[in-house]
Amino acid sequence: MDQPTVVAVARVRHSPLEVLAIAFRMGCTSFGGPVAHLGYFREAFVVRRRWLDERAFADLVALCQFLPGPASSQVFFALGLMRAGYLGGLAAWVGFTLPSAIALVLFAYGASAMTGALGQGLLHGLQLVAVAVVAQAVLGMARSLCPDRARATIAAAALILMSVVSGSLSQVGAIVLGSIAGLVVCRTTADTAPEDGPSPVSHRMGIVFLVVFFVLLALSLAPVREGAGALAAAFYRSGALVFGGGHVVLPLLRDAVVAPGWVPDDAFIAGYGAAQAVPGPLFTFAAYLGAVADVAPGGVAGAALALVSIFVPGMLVLLGTLPFWHGLRAQPRARAAMAGVNAAVIGLLAAALYNPVWTSAVHGLPDFAAAAAGFVLLVAWRAPALLVVALLALAGLVVLPSVS
C-alpha cells in the first residue's frame, strides 16, 4: 500500500528552481509560435533530458489540444507539475511567460526595437527557425507514433482534413476522429500500458479545480463594464473559451478590448505585430493589452491582471482534468484510442508545418535553403536549438535582405 506514495514523492522531489531556470531559458529562446514550442519542448524534455517518453509527451499534447486555453503553455505547465509538483508548474509558467510579457509591456511604453529593415530581417530569420524546429518535431514524433500503415493513414487523414477545413474546431474534430479510428484499427498495435505512477493531482483536487474553473467562468459572464473586475472578466472569458490557443484567441481578444473602446484598433494591431517578434506564448499579448487598455487599473498593474486572468482558466481546467486522464490512458481501449489520437496529432503538426509556419516564412529559394540548413543542424548534427536560433536570426538579419 505504501509503494504508490513512494513513487509520488519521488516524482515531486526535484527542485522548482531547476524548472524555473529551464523555463526562463525556453521563454527567452522559443520563437515561432505554439507548434514550434512543442518542437522545442520535445527536444528539451523527451530527447535531451528524458523527463518523459515520446508517447507520454504526445498524450499530453493531445490532452491540451482538447482543452480550452493556450495548448503549448499548458503542456509546459504540466511538465513542470509532473517534475516538481505545484511549485514546479508555477515555475514553468512564470519562466516561460515573463520574458515575452515584459518585452510587450516595454513595447506598450514605446520601447519597440523591431522596426525598420533590420528588425524585419531579424523577425524573418526567427520565422525560419520555426520551420526547422517544427519539421524536426514532426519527423521525430512520426517515427515513434506512426510506425505502421494504420497510424500513418490516420495521420495523413488528419492532415487532409486540416487542409480542407481550417480552424480550432477542425483540430478537435481531427482528434476525435483519430480516437475513433484508433479504437477500430489500433487494438493490436497500441503500445503497452504506461508506467506513470500516480497523478501529480488527486481526484479530489481535480474536482475542486474544475468547480473553480466553472464558477469563475460564470462570474466572468456577468455584466461588469468598468474597473479591474471588468478587465479580469474579459481576459478570463477569452482564455476559457478558446481551443488550441495561439492565434485562435485573437478574435476573442479583439471583441474583449476593442469593441468596448478600451483599446483602439490600430494599437491592437501594432501590439499583435510586436507579439510576433518576441519568444514565448502568444497569450502574453494580453500583457500589452492590459497595459494600454483605457480601463482601471492600466499600466503595469493592468498588464499583470490581464496576463494572469487569461492564463488561469487553461491551467485550472488542465489541473482538473489530469487526474482522470492519468488513469484513463492506462486502460486497453483508451490506449487504442490514444494510438489513433497521437497519429492524428502528427497530422495536425504536419498541417501546421505548412500553414502557417512554412507559408509565413518561406518565400523563395534563399529562405528554403536557410530553413533546410537549420533542419540539418538540428537533426543530423544535433546542434543546440539556441545555436540554430542565433544562426538563422543572423541569416535573416544579414543575408536574406540582400537577396530579396
Image (tube, rainbow, N blue to C red):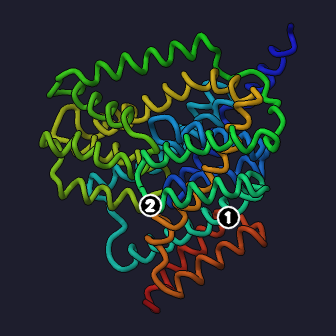
In front: 397, or 141?
Answer: 141
Marks 2 and 1 sit apart, C-alpha to C-alpha, by 24 Å
Total numbered labels placed on residues in the image: 2
Q: Residue at x 45, y 64 (%)?
A: 356
Q: Residue at x 35, y 60 (%)?
A: 274
In front: 115, or 376?
Answer: 376
Where's residue 253, x and y in %?
Answer: 28, 44
Residue situated furthest bottom in the rendering: 403
Where's residue 152, x and y in %?
Answer: 70, 57
* 332 with respect to 88 (left or right): right
* 187 with respect to 205 (left or right): right
Reply above or below: 123 against 366: above
Residue situated furthest top in the rendering: 1
Badges 2 and 1: C-beta atoms under 8 Å apart?
no
Sequence-wise, the earlier of marks 2 and 1 is: 1
Q: Residue at x 52, y 67 (%)?
A: 354
Of the residues shown, which amino acid type is indicated by label 1?
Answer: Gln
At mark 1, the secondary structure is helix
Residue situated furthest left in the rendering: 261
Q: Residues within 10 Å of mark 2 (few under 14, many from 20)?
A: few
Where's residue 305, x and y in %?
Answer: 33, 32
On the image, numbered disc 2 is attached to which residue? 164
Of the residues shown, which amino acid type is indicated by label 2?
Answer: Val
* 67 with respect to 371 (left or right): left
Mark carried by residue 136: 1
